[in-house]
Image: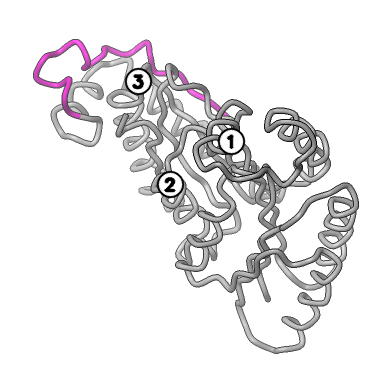
Amino acid sequence: MAEFLIVTGMSGAGRSTTAASLEDLGWFVIDNLPPTIIPRVGELVASSGADAQRVALISGRRGAGDVADMLEAIERLREGSHVVRVLYLDAPDDVLVRRYEGTRRRHPRTSGGVEAAIAEERVALEALRREADIILDSGELNVNQLRNRITEMFSETQGEELMRTTVMSFGFKHGLPLDVDMVFDVRFLPNPHWVDELRPQTGLDGPVSDYVLAAPEAQRFVSQVEEMLSDLLPAFRREGKAYLTIGIGCTGGHHRSVAISEEVSRRLRSEGIAISVFHRDIER
């Protein structure tokens, strides 16, 4: 059975980085393929007889006709005996504007200025966004972080999982991630930031982790989250959810959220649940 990943989304949100990352992971990447040809690619892959092929189709120009053709192509591809996922890359408008101003590239939609083009594209792609299995917000990610995020979602080791589950730590002061399905706030826990010797460290360091987890409320919180997720994850899988991202946030994303994310993930793994961890703001 072949696995197809349709990569679409806003221009400037990381399509090229995503394509390169998938290629590094062993995916067969086809860039700028016209949507009308996509069903034919599915037929060719099916007729080849090869097992477990992983094909990423990176969308190119996306005018009104292209979006309609892409939606039809996705529907026809899903009618075959394939696993078909849609990844939609997004970022806030101000981030997209800065990226275009920084690279001096022309936006694919050239009517008016960059801001007008972005607004026009966002409206045009709304139907594709609704079709997505996962919406990845790259606004707060640098190139290396985006590569890491793609790797933990689409690596071969994750490929056999029916649902790919990620625990993401983040800092509220850097913005709430758009691509999370549920959020936990751990700002009620004692903050290592106010301990001089712990401030330069992160939740990956033993002294910080020990400090955070020593609080009785931290142990109660982790146990409650573990119990809840142990019940919810199988239910999400039964409903056919392909990707689940659980956000755990503190103020800056360096200490408490990192330590709690690692502990929650450790406990779930001990129950045989496959979990990946991504620390969005740990290097800020």
Q: Which residue is mark 3?
A: 252
Q: Amino acid at mark 3?
A: Gly
- Indicate yes or no whether the magenta region holds residue 154: no
What percent of the width, then of the height, locates residue 200? 16, 25
Q: Amino acid at mark 2?
A: Val
- Indicate yes or no whether the magenta region holds residue 188: yes
Residue beneath the point at 63% across and 38% down: 90
Residue beneath the point at 26% across and 14% down: 191
Q: Which residue is mark 1?
A: 179
> Which mark sits nearer the N-terminus, 2 or 3?
2
Whole-number angstrom distance, CA of label 1 to CA of label 3: 18 Å
Q: Amino acid at mark 1?
A: Asp
Residue beneath the point at 60% across and 43% down: 12
What percent of the width, then of the height, locates residue 106? 65, 44
Which quarter of the image is occupied by the N terminus?
A: bottom right
Whole-number angstrom distance, CA of label 2 to CA of label 3: 20 Å
Image side of residue 211 versus residue 248, left or right: left
Residue 231 at least partly seen? no
Q: Main secondary structure of the magenta part?
A: loop
Q: Which residues are magenta?
A: 181-201
Query: Where is residue 220, by image quadrant?
Result: top left
Q: Which residue is mark 2?
A: 143
Q: How is the image coloured?
A: one colour
What percent of the width, then of the height, locates residue 77? 81, 67
Circle 1 residues within 10 Å: few <14, some 14–19, many ≥20: some
Q: Nearer the viewer, residue 227 or 19?
A: 19
Q: Nearer the viewer, residue 109 or 194?
A: 109
